[in-house]
Image (cartoon, rainbow, N blue to C red):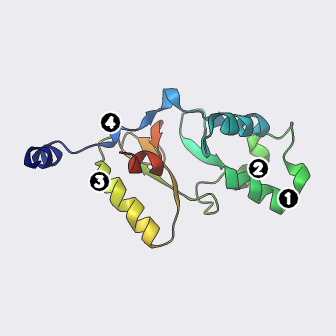
Amino acid sequence: MLESIIKKIELPKKVVDFYKPISKIISAHIGNNVMEYMQKMEQNQISYIPILDDKGFVRGVLGESTVFQCVLDEGINEINENTKFYHIKKYLSLDNTITGSFIFTNEHTLMIELENILYKAYKSNKRIGVIFITKNGKENERLMGLITPYDIIGN
């Protein structure tokens, strides 16, 4: 038991050990078809899809509540087989609190730090949807991967 505690202190878990790399993430670009990605969300049982620009920077997020909010605001006909992400751009914003909060961090962040962030968010009634991984943990960098609160809780 003591050895296990010492090991956890000497070798703490890091994000790099748990995040899903970009090669395994379903992501979209602003010119892609919304309905196609809604179907991918359903088929793959995922809640969020990052919207990337040509440099691989996260420029928005498609979430289940994104579509719901768009339909409420714009009407049922807003999303159809011709709808592209640029048509609903205002609902994809990283600042859109309806979909939850999004955090950027780097792959060397300790898992305990993310656990603390999630705990503080929970205590203040904030919902963190996804944690994006970039080289230096900045929004204006290429996406390397992501980790969800469920990934953190599971580990």
In the image: residue 139, left or right of residue 89: left
Q: Are marks 1 and 2 in contact (CB under 8 Å)?
A: yes
Q: How many marks?
A: 4
Camera-nearest label, 1 or 4: 4
Percent coordinates x, y for residue 89 in the rendering: 72, 50
Q: CA distance from mark 1 to mark 2?
A: 10 Å
Q: Which residue is at a point 38% across and 61% down the rendered structure image?
A: 117
Q: Residue lying farthest top?
A: 23
Quick check: 21 above or below 117?
above
Question: Which type of secondary structure does the marked residue at label 3 adopt?
Answer: helix
Q: Amino acid at mark 1?
A: Glu
Q: Which residue is mark 3?
A: 112
Q: CA distance from mark 1 to mark 4?
A: 42 Å
First of labels 3, 2 by sequence position: 2
Q: Are marks 2 and 4 in contact (CB under 8 Å)?
A: no
First of labels 1, 4 by sequence position: 4
Percent coordinates x, y for residue 27 in the rendering: 60, 35
First of labels 1, 2 by sequence position: 1
Q: Which residue is mark 2?
A: 88
Quick check: 69 above or below 51?
below
Q: Residues within 10 Å of mark 3 (few under 14, many from 20)?
A: some
Q: Which residue is at a point 32% across and 36% down the rendered structure image?
A: 17
Q: Which residue is at a point 44% across and 50% down the rendered structure image?
A: 104
Q: Which residue is mark 1?
A: 74
Q: Residues within 10 Å of mark 1 (few under 14, many from 20)?
A: few
Q: Which residue is mark 4?
A: 17
Camera-nearest label, 2 or 4: 4
Q: In this view of the protein, which residue sits in the foreground, 6 or 22?
A: 6
Q: In this view of the protein, which residue sits in the foreground, 23 or 41?
A: 41
Q: Amino acid at mark 4?
A: Asp
Q: Which residue is at a point 58% across and 54% down the rendered structure image?
A: 94
Camera-nearest label, 3 or 2: 3
